[in-house]
Image (spheres, rainbow, N blue to C red):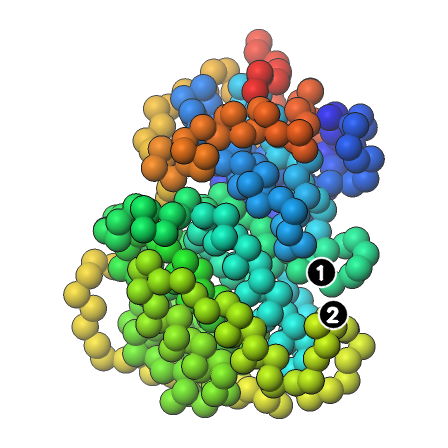
Amino acid sequence: MKLALDKLIGRRGFSRVYVARVTSSSSTNSEVAVKKMHITKHVQNSVLRHEACAYILLAGHSSVPEVYAWGRSQYYDYLALELLGEDVFSVRDGLTLRNFVILACAMLDALEHVHSRGIVHCDVKPGNFLFSRAAPGYQLKLIDFGLAIPFRTGASEPERSTGHLRGTELYASIPAHMHCTLARRDDMESLAYTLVHLACGRLPWAHPSVNILHRKVAWRAEAAGVPPVLAQFVASTRALGFDAEPEYAHWRAAFRALVPLRDDDQFNPADEGLRVIDWAPQIQPQPQPQIQILQNPPSSDSDSDSIPSSDDGWVPTSVWPAPVSIRLSHLFADGDEQAVVRDSERLERIEEPPEMGKAWLVQCDRPERMMDF
């Protein structure tokens, strides 16, 4: 596959995301999204190869974006994916209860599928649920598997201290704040906070002067007036054990009981039913609780092993985050992600450094070239 990067549309973690034109391909001729991330020769297990591997392992479900191509040069990793639309919070204004239930069930479907393949997402939040641009419209997709880790029931990494918070602090589970190994329960708790944010307009700890962990520990959804089914969902996810299997079907049924729905009902932006803002209270900021947390406060969400400094003649025209490498214990496919990516029939190789409208490397003696898989 050959690509031309047209427009920078976002920055996600250590990567940048572009809209790109496919100039040569055997699988697609449409616009795609391309994630680009700085690496060096010392990065053995790159984040974008890890993410490509996740998409390959998860392929075949409606919540999983299409993955088209991956490639690596001496300076950058590239990953070409299905180009998607806005995130789920973009429809919050005017959101009806019917559409809220459809979104909640779609998110539960997505996590059930991810967990069934032995993967924990580790960064569930509104910004990682995007709508499809292709027909049928408003199909929800779960993205950004750069922090995802493997999970095997009864044989997973034991619960222990990791030394850092993994994920996004606002939506992270309480065990994540405590630096615990993440499991299915943590994705579910993050989903609960995502749904509370979507229904109630904000999270009570979304304020720069609030200690997020203290607020989460003290907060009780039912006492805050959150509708019973949503408050029960929050409490249930918090009560899950490390190795417990979430009750996906039970909670889909509980949310669907709120409104009459057919099995094939889809998100409908023209729906004029009861609005979520008339069903759920709009959360207001509250005073900081006076409680004591025994564990250390969270540190960064870095997942990387230490990377020696090496630029190999790399002189970019803009500042990039330092390169990172996925830890061996967090690799999929028993550590052989290279084989998954190399042998996948659905993944093309990016043959040349993607074209750009302006220079992104200062003239140097080592022009960018693509490497073997």
| Disc number lying in front (2 or 1) | 2
Q: Is residue 61 above or below residue 73?
A: below
Q: Is residue 8 visible?
A: no
Residue 240 in which image quadrant? bottom left
- All told, the count of numbered labels is 2
Q: Which of 328 and 33 is in front in this view?
A: 328
Instruction: Tell me the amino acid under the disc marked 1.
Output: Gln
Disc 1 element:
loop
Q: In this view, does 10 lie above or below 269?
A: above
Q: Is residue 81 above or below residue 358?
A: below
Residue occupying image coordinates x 36% and y 82%: 220
Disc 2 element:
loop
Pointer 2 residue: 264
Q: Which of 322 and 138 is in front in this view?
A: 138
Circle nearer the N terminus (2, 1): 1
Q: Where is residue 325 in the image (x, y as percent from the top left)?
A: 41, 32
Residue occupying image coordinates x 37% and y 55%: 183
* Mark number, residue 139: 1
Q: In this view, does 62 lie above or below 331?
A: below
Q: Position of residue 1 (x, y in %)?
A: 73, 26
Residue occupying image coordinates x 62% and y 16%: 369
Labels 2 & 1 near each other (Cβ < 8 A):
no
Instruction: Tell me the amino acid under the disc marked 2.
Output: Asp
In the image, taking residue 170 as reference, residue 297 lies left or right, namely left
Q: Where is residue 368 in the image (x, y as percent from the top left)?
A: 61, 17
Q: Nearer the viewer, residue 155 or 310?
A: 155
